[in-house]
Amino acid sequence: MEALKAQRKSLRTAFTVAAKSVKQHLENLESDGKDLGKLSSLYSQVDDKFSRLEVIQKEITSLLLENTSTHSEFEADFEAAESYRDNYLDLKTKVEASLKSSRGLFNALQWTMHRNSSCRNLS
C-alpha cells in the first residue's frame, strides 16, 4: 500500500501543477480570447492525470476497506480524494463552457463575415 500512496502523491502533485496551468490559461483566455488549442491541450493533460490518479485511488480505497482497523484513515483518504474530484469537475465544467462559448463566438463571426461578403457581392 505504501508504494501506491507514493505513486498517488506524485500524481496528485502532477495534477495540481496541471490544474494550475489550466486555471491560469482560463484567466488569460478571458482577458485576450486567444489560444483555444493550448487550453484544449492543457485540459487533456489534466484529464489524463486525473484518470491515472483515479485508478490508484480505487486501489488504495479497496485496500483500506479490507482492513477494518483503518476506518478513520479511510474517511480522511476519502475526503482528500473527493477534493481532487471536485477540483477536476470544476475545471472540466469551466473549460467546456469556455470552449463552447468561444466556438459559438467563432461561428457567429464566421456567419457575419460570410453574410457581409455575400452582401458586397450583390452590390
Image (cartoon, grey):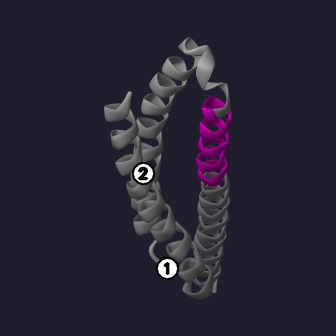
Q: Quadrant of the N terminus?
A: top left
- Which residue is situated farthest in the front direction here? 69
Query: Which residue range is magenta in the image?
Result: 73-89
Residue 7 found in image quarter = top left
For the residues carrying marks 2 and 1, which lies nearer the camera in this image?
2
Report x, y in % for residue 106. 59, 70
Q: Residue 95, can we see it?
A: yes
The residue nearer to you, when weighing 54 against 46, is 54
**Secondary structure of the magenta portion, mostly?**
helix
**Type of amino acid at the residue the image marks with label 2:** Ser
The residue nearer to you, when weighing 84 against 109, is 84
Residue 44 badge: 2
Q: Is residue 86 magenta?
A: yes
- Circles 2 and 1, Cβ within 8 Å, touching? The answer is no
Report x, y in % for residue 37. 41, 65
Residue on which disc 1 sits:
34
Establish if 79 lies above or below 13: above
Q: Alpha carbon of mark 2 to alpha carbon of mark 1: how far? A: 18 Å
Q: Is residue 95 magenta?
A: no
Question: Which residue: 31% across, 33% down?
Answer: 3
Report x, y in % for residue 4. 36, 32
Question: Which residue: 48% across, 27% down?
Answer: 60
Residue 104 badge: none
Identify the mark nearer the N-term, 2 or 1: 1
Residue 75 found in image quarter = top right
Residue 87 found in image quarter = bottom right
Q: What SS does tag 2 mark?
A: helix
Question: Which residue: 44% across, 51% down?
Answer: 12
Q: What SS does tag 1 mark?
A: loop
